Structure formats: C-alpha cells, structure tokens
Image (cartoon, rainbow, N blue to C red):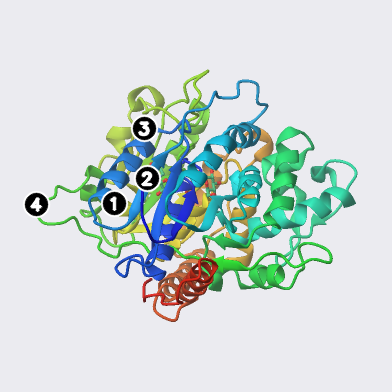
Amino acid sequence: MASACPTIVLIPLCVPGHLPSMFEAGKRLFNSCGGGGGGAMSLTVLFTQMTMSANLISDVDDLIRKESGSGLDIHFHHLPAVELPTDSPGAENFIMRFIQLHAPHVKAALSGLSSPVAAVVADYFCTTLFDVTLELALPVYAYFSSSASMLALILRLPALDEEVTGDLVDMEGAIDVPGMPPVPAALLPGPLMTKGPNYEWMVYHGKRLMEAAGIIVYTVAELEPAVLAAIADGRCVPGRRAPTVYTVSPALSVKAAPGDGERPHECVAWLDAQPPASVVLLCFGSLGGSFPPPQVHEIADALERSGHRFLWVLRGPVPAGCGAPYPTDANVDELLPDGFLERTKDRGLVWPKWAPQKDIMARPAVGGFVTHCGWNSVLESLWHGVPMAPWPLYAEQHLKAFELVSVMGVAVAMEVDRERGNYVEAAELERAVRSLMGGSEEGRKAREKAAEAKALCRNAVEEGGSSYVSLQKLAREMLAYCGCEAGASASL
Ligand SMILES: O=c1ccn([C@@H]2O[C@H](COP(=O)(O)OP(=O)(O)O[C@H]3O[C@H](CO)[C@@H](O)[C@H](O)[C@H]3O)[C@@H](O)[C@H]2O)c(=O)[nH]1
C-alpha cells in the first residue's frame, strides 16, 4: 500500500446503502485531484469487516478486483476483525460500538501509511473515529449517504434534545427541520422518536459532525435547495455555522443495454419485452422486501386488481439470530396466494432474490417505483425520471417519503400505517399504483416533476454543474492541505 504521493483515506460503513455511493464519490474526488492520471493523489480505502450481505461481499470483491487491475493509484486495506458487540439494544448502537472498537486499528493503519494523508473521509456513522484523526492532526470530512434533509435533522438534534424534556415523538405540533416544511413528529426516524441508547448515539453524531472539516452529502443540490441553504445559513445549530457542505450527486450509467455477447439478467430481459413506462417496480432496499404473509397477500391482491404490469422483488424472511439482518430468498410458491403467478403471468414478474436494481431502473419499461425510500433508491429513480409511491419501512425513510411527496412532488402519497408495522392495505396500494401509472392528476404531476428531477440530476454532474463544482472545490482544499498545486483535473 506504499505510494509516494499524498492519499485520501476513505473509511466507509460496509453496508449496501452506504459503501457503493461513498466509494464512487471518493473515486470521483480522487479524479478531481488529478489522481486519474497526473499522479497528484492516491486513494486508500480502509474496510471494516462488517457483517455484510452476500451481495455486498461479492460487490466489494468485484470492486477490489476491478480497481486493482485498473492501473489507478487505489489501495484497499482490510482492518483486523474486532469482536462483535453482542449486547447492543439496536442497529445504531451496534454499528457505533462496532466502529468504535476499530479506533486502534484505524490509528495503526493511518500511522503506517507511507504516503502523507491529504484528508480522511469517514462515513457519518463513524464519527467515533474523529478522535483518531484529531490525535494524528489529520483533516477529517464526514460522508453523508442520506439526504440533506436528514443531515439538517441530525445537525439540529443536539439542540432539539436540550429543548425537549420528553421523547420527541410526544412533542406538541411539528418538528422544525430547518429548510423543510414542519415535519410531523410521527415521521421522525425510529431511533429519534424515544430517548435511549440509539437516540443518544444520533445526538452524539449530530455534535461530532460539527467537528468535521466539511460534510460530503450524497444528493443533488437542486433537489434540496432550501435545506442546503438552511444548513449553510447556520439555522441548524444555534449560534454556530455547520461545516461546509459539498454535494456529490449520483453519476449513474446511461448505458442501459447489456454489452455485446452479454446475456441480460432475467429481469432486464423481461422488462425489455414490455411497452415503455408500463411497469411498476416494487423493490425495498437491502434490508426490506420481506413482508409477513398477510402483507404479501395484500400486495398480490393490489397488483392483481390494479391491472398494471409489475416487477416485484419479493424477499424471504430474515434468519433469526443471525448477525446480518439481510433477507433470504423468497419461496414464492409458499408465500403468494394460490394461482396468483398463473393469473398474472402475462403482465407480472415476481423476482425472489436480490435484483440488479440499477440496471432495472435504466430500462425504458419502468414507469413507476414503489420504494421504501432508501436514499440510493430514490436517487436512482430520479436519475431516470421515474416517479415513486413511497412505502417507508425503517431508518429515516418516513422523513424521505414526506420530502418526496410534499417538497419535491416526485411521488404520489400512499397511506402507510406505521403503528401496524408499516402496513399497507391492498385497496390503498391498488389506488396508489393506479394513480402512479394511470391518468390521475396526482400521477401526472409526479411524472412531470420526476422528469424535471432527471434533468437536474444529469446537469449536476456535467462540467460546471453543482456536483462537479463541489468536487473541484473539495479537491482544491484537499490538495492545499498537503501543499500540492491546485491542479485539479476535469472530471464528473
Ligand atoms: O434487490 C435489490 C435491492 C437493493 N439494491 C440496491 O441496493 C441499494 C439500497 O440502498 P437504499 O435504497 O438506500 O436502501 P437501504 O439499503 O435500505 O439503505 C440504507 O442506507 C440509505 C442511505 O443512507 C438510507 O437512506 C436507508 O434508509 C438505509 O436503510 C440501492 O443502490 C439499490 O439499487 C439492489 O441492487 N437490488
């Protein structure tokens, strides 16, 4: 891993919703620093041995293989395994403690690099590692894989915590998330609703993010202008301005078709036999898609009655007592109502395992997306101008659903009963699918807004676009830290 030129060190959270976008952003930053050719900078990635889904493990292996053979100055380093905390009362708490245990290994890895470190970029769930970077006097940037709206809420949280004596969910009225319309408390991310160990960690992150040299947010500035202005104007933290926010937008492939001689994935081949914008996609991220049998039946009824074409990524149960909360493959014969597959075989495909969502989303047949509102899925949808029907399930997804419908207007509203485990009745899903795919005024507006969002996404990564400019600015800053010329090269 030796390299003479300065290096940018990435410390990602190794989960599917965080790692791919962060690596992509890091690589584009490295290119903007001249790393792609001029030898001005190298990139080092420190992997924690997080319990990963099988899909991510193969993605990480592929990524390392591909990048190692690319001739680019990118280095991968696996940190030693740590003993997994066994008594954590929730995912957030587990992750924070898991990351914290890596501090000595991160310190040893950073100290052992033969290249001078230009900057460290750490996932925002890794703020416990800021102590190491402070000790080594290295500039540290936070990478925020979620929306700017979520960032505004996290930055606001420490003050909110002091203002409110009880649980946030019991607050009278709505929550003030700077730059957003008033957010009903019932839409807060799960860990923020009631005070406890997971909540405390989120408050901790809110405080520590203020120590970062900058915050790199995976978003499109033009999609969230009011929130970004509120952060920049210092409206999140009383009396203090938040670190500078750099927006890095997705730059997804526009090559939609498989290459010569490549066999398309079954889902892609099926989509290519459907008319343009005729299929509603249902896919629920890396942890979702596995529903209790009554809910599976409601979805099946809704899809059958809607009469629309569909591609439904249905997952099996999450194995009990297993460290990784990732769903198994679905046994569709067991899960689906009798005769459903036969009755819908001419217009529907149920895919029982991990699906190539990015490739699917790029196919012209996809006309609408029922999504759990994971931020990667949202941006993938908007990159292709596909309107959504939000079905939030966990984490900050209820906030996103609100933002998609009430702020961006790129989604039709759908009633999700959070108190019943985010249950959606068949009639409601059928209504939402008809509205999204059919001729309703609501659906028409969402399609129009999604088409506008597509243009914003694509412009952001063009030369002179918001993401391009952010990366150039960040590159100059990082080059300056290590006394290099500000010779950033053109890149996305
Ligand atoms: O069958 C599948 C399911 C998912 N994906 C991909 O996996 C990623 C999933 O990311 P995301 O849509 O953001 O969902 P989560 O995996 O749930 O992401 C976590 O991380 C996100 C970013 O911080 C948060 O917004 C979410 O709430 C949080 O759950 C996306 O790129 C999808 O294209 C597939 O390729 N195939």
Which residue occupies the foreground of this view, 264 or 345? Answer: 264
State the SS at label 2.
strand
Q: Is residue 457 above or below residue 172?
A: below
Label 2 and label 1: CA atoms lie apart by 9 Å
Q: Is residue 222 above or below residue 367?
A: below
Estimate the x, y position of residue 31 in percent, counting from the top left. Answer: 37, 66
User: Toward which corner of the image does residue 488 lie, by quadrant?
Assistant: bottom left
Binning the other alpha carbons within 10 Å of mark 3 as few (below 14), some (14 to 19) or many (20 upward) gives: few
Binning the other alpha carbons within 10 Å of mark 4 as few (below 14), some (14 to 19) or many (20 upward) gives: few
Which amino acid, mark 4?
Answer: Gly
Which amino acid, mark 1?
Answer: Glu
Estimate the x, y position of residue 317 in percent, counting from the top left. Answer: 46, 25
Label 1 and label 4: CA atoms lie apart by 23 Å
**Residue 67, disc:** 1
Binning the other alpha carbons within 10 Å of mark 2 as few (below 14), some (14 to 19) or many (20 upward) gives: some
Residue shown at the point (56%, 61%) measured from the top left: 217
In primary-sequence order, the first of circles 2 and 4 is 2
Q: Are marks 3 and 1 in contact (CB under 8 Å)?
A: no
Q: Which residue is mark 4?
A: 261
**Residue 76, disc:** 2
In primary-sequence order, the first of circles 2 and 1 is 1
**Residue 416, disc:** none
